[in-house]
Image: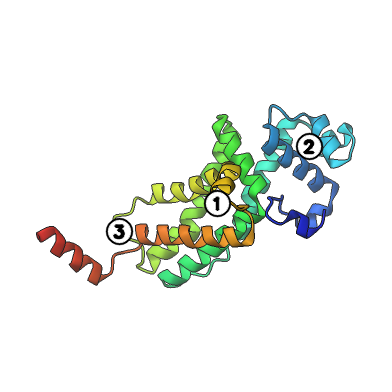
Amino acid sequence: MSPDDRKGSAQVRVRRSDLSTYARIRNAALEGFAENGVAGTSIRDVAAAAGVSPGLVQHHFGTKSRLRDAVDEFVVEVAIETFRDLVPGDGEEVWAAMGATTTDWVRDNAVALRYVARSLTEGDDGAARTLDALVTIARASWLEPLKRGGALDPEVDEQWAALHVIVFNLATVLMEPAISAQLGAPFFSPEQLQRWNLATTQLYRRALTRPSPRRTRASARRSAG
């Protein structure tokens, strides 16, 4: 499949280390878990998708439980790698960087996010731990820079703000076919991803940024009237 054929679709993020047999098996497991659930994906299924024998899967991972743990670790590792280099700055710099980075993260890791979303709806303990890690990353890489720069509204519930950004991203990926139908175009196309970036960043900026003195005075006048 050529890059043009993949335009508008979701892929598993591929890195240089993913050329190894270990990584190919892990990525095949991730795709299978995202599509069919952990319970619905056997070691034989993973082996067939990776083009290896079931014995080789067991050689690298031992059990399906340990294979699932490796998938969870990979999802969190990629999120940390993606967001750790955000440069703190004033509010606008943080918003622009967060919006662009989150959009790239969803585009490049949609299969991983679909796996997490599906597993959470199934009550999977591993997915719950992954959610904990993603919320921690959101607070550290996004909310804390806004707070240090004085741009975060002090009345914001930070735990819910972090939860919202993760849940919105997971839900968007999980419901992507229906969203694409609403848009009349593939959500994962560059144009629709940019549209989503702008709309979502604007939503969060207005909801979470400290009100300017001008806005605060105008609000006080309306309340007094």
Tell me how far mark 2 sits from mark 3, CA to CA. Answer: 46 Å
Q: Looking at the image, which residue is at 38% across and 52% down?
A: 158
On the image, numbered disc 3 is attached to which residue? 154
Q: Looking at the image, which residue is at 88% across and 37% down?
A: 56
Q: In this view, does 57 lie to the left or right of 139?
A: right
Q: In this view, does 221 lie to the left or right of 69?
A: left
Q: Looking at the image, which residue is at 69% across and 27% down?
A: 39
Q: Which amino acid does label 2 sit on?
A: Phe
Circle 1 Cα neighbour tier, 10 Å, few/some/many (<14 / 14–19 / ≥20): few
Query: Toward the viewer: 90 or 31?
Result: 31
User: Looking at this rendering, what residue extends furthest in the front direction?
Assistant: 184
Foreground disc of the pair 1, 2: 1
User: Looking at this rendering, what residue extends furthest in the left direction?
Assistant: 225
Q: Quadrant of residue 32?
A: top right
Q: Which amino acid does label 1 sit on?
A: Leu
Q: How many marks?
A: 3
Q: What residue type is labelled 3?
A: Pro
User: Which badge, 2 or 3, comes first in the chain's sequence?
Assistant: 2
Q: Is residue 34 left or right of residue 55?
A: left
On the image, numbered disc 2 is attached to which residue? 61
Tell me how far mark 1 sits from mark 2, CA to CA. Answer: 41 Å
Q: Is mark 1 on a helix, strand or loop?
A: helix
Q: Is mark 2 on a helix, strand or loop?
A: helix
On the image, numbered disc 1 is attached to which residue? 183
Q: In this view, does 68 lie above or below 39?
A: below
Tag shown at residue 110: none
